[in-house]
Amino acid sequence: MKIYTQKSIRRQSHKIITAVFSAVLIIGLVFYFENDLKLARKNLSEIISPCARPLEYSLGDFDKRFGLSREDFLSAVSQAAEIWQKPAGKKLFNQAAGGALKINLIYDSRQAATDKLKKLGFSIHNNQATYESLKNKYDGFVKIYNTQKNDFDDIAKYYEEQKADYEAEVKAAQSRGGVNSEEYDILEEERKNLNKLIESIKQKQAALNKTADDINAVANVINRLIRQLNLTVGDYNSIGEKTADEFQQGQYIRDQAGEKINIYQFDDRPALIRVLAHELGHALNLDHLDNPEAIMYRLNESGQEKITADDLATLKKTCGIK
């Protein structure tokens, strides 16, 4: 028969408490780092057997200002996926409810600038001719803006002078104890003229703002073309706003929160399909290629809707396809 002393009981209790605490701590850490562990397992799985199963994707944020329906957008995603799948002879992507890869359509200043230029009658292409045309338009808008700004400054200055004179006359009349009917009529006419000047200032301000918006839209697209065409020129200035340092049409992101593709801008459906195909390539762990014709070239400047031999070779190497 084993006899338990008070000391041995305390020692046994301490062991039990330590074991329970350790178990709770481990469980807590597992829950705390659950997303990190899932991502680590996913990364390890992709290293061991890349492309073993199709990547499941689903639609995330969707902005209707692009003028696309959800069905149209998902159709474009499907076409982009097929650009990789058909040459590979393998299903690489699959649309599924709750698919981990979220594809988002995000409307901001990039697409707003493209839409505005289209309304102004511009056909935007990723080529030198479009750049030259927009550069000339930018210079024209700046001249108009400077003229409008000078007119606005002049009338605003004149208004302030007239307003000061009017207020001085009113103050003088008050110090005299009031005005007669003739003086009242003069002051009333001056007040009406001040109101007319205010309306004129508002109109000139609206025209100035519109021209500034046109300049910003043109500058936004010109700066994108500068990067896409790899031109050795400086950025074009915007008025009253700061644009992003780097113009991205799309972006693939993988972090602790999961995986997502953000689409920000495209000129037409072929360009949308191409930028989707590029970002889907990143989702397959493909890096950029130096071939300007390749889907995985760093810029979306080619009109190609098929992968190149370079793209296919990289895909086969990454996915272990023979």
Image (cartoon, rainbow, N blue to C red):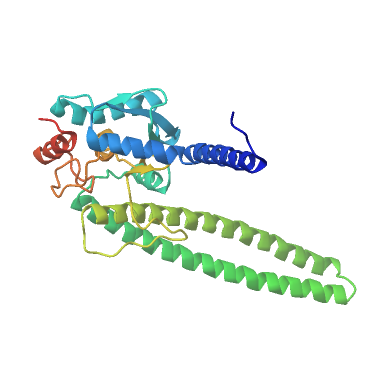
Up-down relation of residue 303 to residue 88 (above or below): below
Q: Is residue 187 visible?
A: yes
Q: Residue at x 11, y 41 (%)?
A: 310
Of all residues, the one furthest to the front in this rendering is 1
* Spot occupied by residue 141 in the image (x, y as percentages of width and height): 37, 58
Count of numbered labels shown in the rendering: 0
Q: Quadrant of residue 315?
A: top left
Query: Nearest the camera: 181 or 161?
Result: 161
Tell whether 248 sits left or right of 192: left
Up-down relation of residue 318 to residue 220 (above or below): above
Q: Residue at x 26, y 53 (%)?
A: 225
Q: Residue at x 71, y 65 (%)?
A: 190
* Spot occupied by residue 156 in the image (x, y as percentages of width and height): 58, 67
* Spot occupied by residue 82 in the image (x, y as percentages of width and height): 22, 27
Query: Nearest the camera: 178 or 108?
Result: 108
Q: Residue at x 19, y 31 (%)?
A: 84
Q: Which quadrant holds the N terminus?
A: top right
Q: Is residue 268 visible?
A: no
